[in-house]
């Protein structure tokens, strides 16, 4: 089968530096809730960002698995008609790793407390309020990717048209990726985009990638970004 006909469903993760802020007066009182300040800070032109909640993270006392979170989501959706998606995440705040549940696609802040109450009824224990923060942190989110491989090593997300991925020739640790991304940015004359690290779990290997977000998403642009990254990877 040619690459252009390949539709894949992979497990994997996204790693990204984000600026988070403590969200107050929106969920269950006295629990810690964070919100991403700008979901795609490298992309200039994201519209309607304040019209609905951004990515929300709720730290938990216990460490959960991806399976735990998706079973929790399925159970909540039996009783809750709101639009949302739950994922497992970990947040590194000054070397303090916090296991968290990410909420995506929430349409209204008023729905947050309802979903959080459902979680509590299913046995989830949340971290209690601490010091308010507004700072950059490193976040790793586990998820399932539904992608189409249009050319070998280049994948387009089938759920979000603004997102695509390209394979890296080797694994980059976060600092290495950060340095390469900065080199590319300083030598880039194209349209704006946001980049993050990603990986897919395949049957016999782990595939390391860069996740690209841009409203002008197409193969020509993605290939140009890929070539730029490859020039700076040593």
Image (spheres, grey):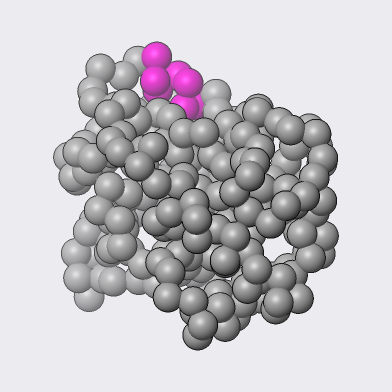
Q: Main secondary structure of the magenta part?
A: helix
Residue 156 or residue 234, whichever sits in front: 156
- The answer to which image quadrant residue 145 occupies is bottom left
Task: Identify which residue is drawn at 65% across, 41% down.
Answer: 24
Residue 120 on image: x %, y %: 71, 71
Q: In the picture shown, does residue 123 fall above or below 232? A: below
| Magenta stretch, residue numbers | 180-186
The structure residue drawn at horizontal position 62% and vertical position 41%, both measured from the top left corner, is 23
* Relative height, residue 90 to residue 62 (above, below): above
Residue at left 62%, top 34%?
21
In the figure, 2 relative to 22: above or below? Answer: below
Q: With 152 as the anchor, is 137 left or right in this view?
A: right
Q: Please tell me which residue is depicted at 80% across the width and 54% down the height of the picture.
A: 127
Residue 137's quadrant in the figure? top right
Residue 199 visible in the shown view: no
Which quadrant holds residue 41?
top left
Residue 90 in percent (x, y) is at 68, 52
Residue 76 versus residue 54 in the image, above or below? below
Whether residue 131 can be seen here: yes
| Viewer-side residue, 48 vs 220 | 48
Name the residue at the top extreme.
186
Q: Quadrant of the N terminus?
A: bottom left
Task: Compare residues 62 and 84 and report the one nearer the observer.
Answer: 84
Residue 46 image offset from top left, x and y in percent = 31, 34
């Amino acid at each position: 089968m040619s690459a252009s006909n390949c539709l894949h469903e992979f497990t994997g993760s996204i790693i990204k530096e984000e600026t988070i802020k403590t969200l107050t007066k929106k969920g269950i009182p006295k629990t810690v809730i964070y919100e991403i300040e700008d979901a795609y800070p490298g992309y200039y032109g994201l519209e309607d960002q304040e019209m609905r909640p951004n990515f929300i993270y709720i730290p938990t006392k216990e460490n959960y698995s991806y399976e735990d979170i998706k079973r929790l989501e399925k159970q909540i959706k039996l009783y809750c008609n709101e639009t949302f998606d739950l994922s497992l995440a970990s947040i590194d705040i000054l070397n303090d790793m916090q296991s968290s549940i990410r909420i995506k696609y929430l349409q209204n802040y008023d729905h947050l407390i309802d979903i959080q109450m459902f979680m509590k009824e299913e046995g989830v224990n949340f971290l209690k309020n601490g010091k308010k923060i507004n700072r950059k942190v490193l976040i790793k989110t586990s998820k399932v990717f539904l992608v189409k491989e249009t050319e070998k090593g280049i994948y387009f997300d089938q759920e979000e048209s603004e997102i695509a991925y390209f394979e890296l020739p080797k694994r980059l640790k976060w600092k290495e990726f950060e340095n390469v991304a900065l080199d590319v940015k300083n030598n880039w004359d194209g349209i704006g985009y946001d980049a993050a690290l990603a990986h897919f779990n395949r049957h016999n290997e782990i595939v390391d990638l860069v996740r690209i977000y841009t409203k002008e998403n197409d193969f020509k642009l993605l290939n140009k970004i890929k070539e730029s990254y490859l020039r700076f990877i040593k």
